Amino acid sequence: MAYYYDEPSRTFNEYLLVPGHTPATCVPASVSLKTPLVKYRKGQEECPLSLNIPMVSAIMAAVSDDNMAVALATEGGLSFIYGNQTIEQEAAMVARVKNYKAGFVESDANLSPDMTLNQVVALKEQTGHSTMPVTDDGSAHGKLLGVVTERDYRLSRMTGEEKVSEFMTPLEKLVTASEDTSLKVANDIIWDHKLNSLPLVDAEGNLVYMVFRKDYDSHKSNPNEMLDSHKRYIVGAGINSRDYAERVPALVEAGADVLCIDSSEGYSDWQKMTIEWVREHYGDSVKIGAGNVVDGEGFRFLAEAGADFVKIGIGGGSICITRETKGIGRGQATATIEVAKARDEYFKETGIYVPICSDGGIVYDHHISLALAMGADFVMLGRYFARFDESPSAKVMVNGTYMKEYWGEGSARARNWGRYDLGGKKSLSFEEGVDSYVPYAGPLKDNIAVTLLKIKSTMCNCGALTIPEFQDKAKLTVISSTSIVEGGAHDVVLKDKAPYASNM
Ligand code: RVP
């Protein structure tokens, strides 16, 4: 006979935190959100890899590329570069994050001398950049010949057919510096010469980087930055349980700091075999998370297989229709609570603390606080990050409002067979995800600052200055459907739409 659970499976929306005593010392500025990312002997050693904020971005083509990875690592979180691309492409993205130097820009708007003014204007519109280096071959690292800015042309007095070589500011009139110039010195040159940008060139005169005056503020250090021992950004990468023997070495070689097996259902021999292969070839030096599971049994299976962290969640993702198509899954809150219990039991038995990540279904900022209170060490978000400038998807105008495209890895658009297929031919037999839009929300930095402040504020209401303290002190209550109504604005006529409508 089938097993029946006593309790219904619940979502974050069905819970609230009940505040505890707040000591005068408990203020958001004093809260630390540092949290372990990989397993360790808690109480006996430091966690070898921690996050400075408990947020990672989803292993999805619409969310986590190298651009997102740099933006999120700057704020203290981590991206897992999506795995549904060729091994070479994924490794190149990882390498770009590891080679990224804050303030040194590889120009993405480049001209060759025989391009026309019309082409310059079109490229400016396409990239949004008005300073364009001119190189012999029109590439980002060709021989530098000059620079074109808006000051070099007057559209009203020109035909549009003029060649770049006729109106660019030529190399001999430019101030340039050598490729090994430090950011501080580059900024001094920019200020001393009243420049807007400074090209850095190698000994052969090839363009290496551009440094821009407008980026000056963002060069200042970010206190939460996730950096490795060589001061490079920390980055994760998604893998699958099929081509790991080729993909893992390439990603490790490119510098990936942590891997994660990306699967919609992780309680399987495929994941165990993948982890065993990594241990056999790399011992504990390569960190690898696994998932997704939704109960204690699934957690224990992956922990015993050697996973460095375990991801929770089936069917809760905003773009996910797994529950509708296959009838499997579990409410994200119930799954998180149960896996957290299993994690704590496993720690008591073995002394090994295996961090857990609540993945999918986080709609409001307060859902992050709830997930942490329920025992998650960190959360993975897709929809949340897809809304920002830094996500790789297109920004489009829909009915007068800016949106970003956001599609599931199980959608026909992604065709990520490696994530869903249980064997057989390399195809996606049916869809488990949708293609959608999410409201455009601007830069990651601004949004994440508000989200983190809300989390810290909630933690203070519960008298907690750290995530473990929060988990210890949190008091949670299931709420009735009528209290859910009471929780929003009610019995008033709103002047505008709800303020949180566009906020996650
Ligand atoms: P959300 O943050 O609610 O948008 O959910 C993101 C999560 O949804 C991902 O991290 C992944 O676990 C899951 N996902 C991704 N694609 C699909 C799908 O097509 N069903 N689901």
Image: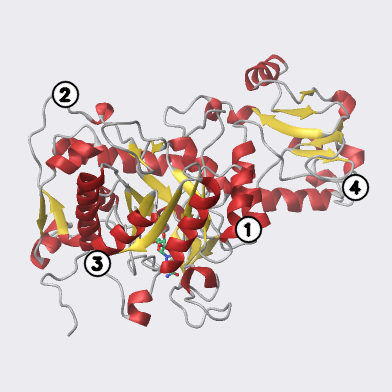
Between 168 and 26, the one nearer to me in the picture: 26
**In the image, is 204 to the left or to the right of 56?**
right
| Residue that carries the numbered disc 3 in the rendered image | 331
Mark pair 3, 2: CA separation: 36 Å
Q: Amino acid at mark 3?
A: Gly
Instruction: Give residue 154's quadrant in the image.
Output: top right
Direction from residue 230 to residue 294 in the image, left or right: left
Q: Earlier in the sequence, mark 1 or mark 2?
A: 2
Image quadrant, ligand 1: bottom left
Three-letter code, disc 4? Glu
Residue pictured at 32% horizontal, 47% vertical: 354
> Would you name the residue on which mark 1 appears?
246
Pointer 3 local density, CA inside 10 Å: few below 14, some 14–19, many at least 20: some
Residue for badge 4: 162
Q: Secondary structure at mark 4?
A: loop
Residue 264 in sight here: no
Which sits earlier in the primary sequence, circle 3 or circle 4?
A: 4
Mark 2 — residue?
25
